[in-house]
Amino acid sequence: MKGFSRFSTLALVVSLLALFTGGMVTDSHAYRGKGGDPMMKQLLKGIDLTDQQREQIKEIIQAHRNELLTGKVAVLQARQKLLEAMTSSTYEKSAVNAAYNTLAVAQQHMTDMRAQIFNAVITTVLTPDQQAAVQEKITAKNQRIQQVIAGLQAKLKTPPPGTQ
């Protein structure tokens, strides 16, 4: 970390800790009976689910509970390893990359499970009108993401290759 002052190093470590522990605290509530997948919860909010539909969704999630919990543990453990590699007293690119790759694989597995569950909910529980309402929310979310991307790209001093 040549060229960094003690303050800069401390600020970097505090920022990294806030980033990773904040994500852990937020994500750790999922699948502990505290509301499940936040993305699914947001997309299903306000589409007037019946009590029967809520029960069906709960049963679908419960059917995958152990797999979700196992996946969550793997993600949290991988985050711990990445944090350790990133905040080590000596920087080792290979250790950071290995820890990151482990985290990426664990997150990919969780994303796949969540997508399977979400697909099951959409295709087996929701009415066509509810499916359309969810699709509208997804479209709006993608538009907001695109706006953020455009705003960030506008701040770049030189645009990345292939964006002009």
Image: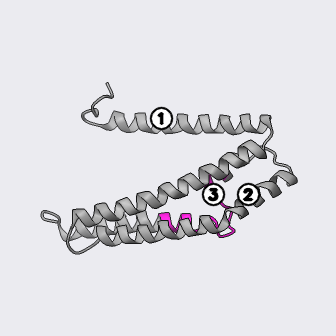
Q: Which mark is residue 14?
A: none
Q: Is residue 29 magenta?
A: yes
Residue 49, compared with residue 135, is above or below; it is below
Task: State the SS at label 2.
Answer: helix
The residue type indicated by label 1 comes to Gln
Q: Which residue is tagged 2?
A: 60
Residue 53, compared with residue 20, is above or below; it is above
Q: Which mark is residue 147?
A: 1
Q: Residue at left 67%, top 62%?
A: 64
- Which residue range is magenta in the image? 23-40
The residue type indicated by label 2 comes to Ile
Task: State the SS at label 1.
Answer: helix
Residue 137 locus on image (x, y percent): 65, 38
> Toward which corner of the image does residue 85 lie, by quadrant?
bottom left
Q: How many marks?
A: 3
Q: Is residue 82 left or right of residue 53?
A: left
Q: Which residue is tagged 3?
A: 37
Measure the alpha-carbon separation of dots 1 and 2: 34 Å
Q: Residue at left 81%, top 48%?
A: 49
**Closer to the camera: disc 1 or disc 2?**
2
Measure the alpha-carbon separation of dots 3 and 2: 12 Å
The residue type indicated by label 3 comes to Asp
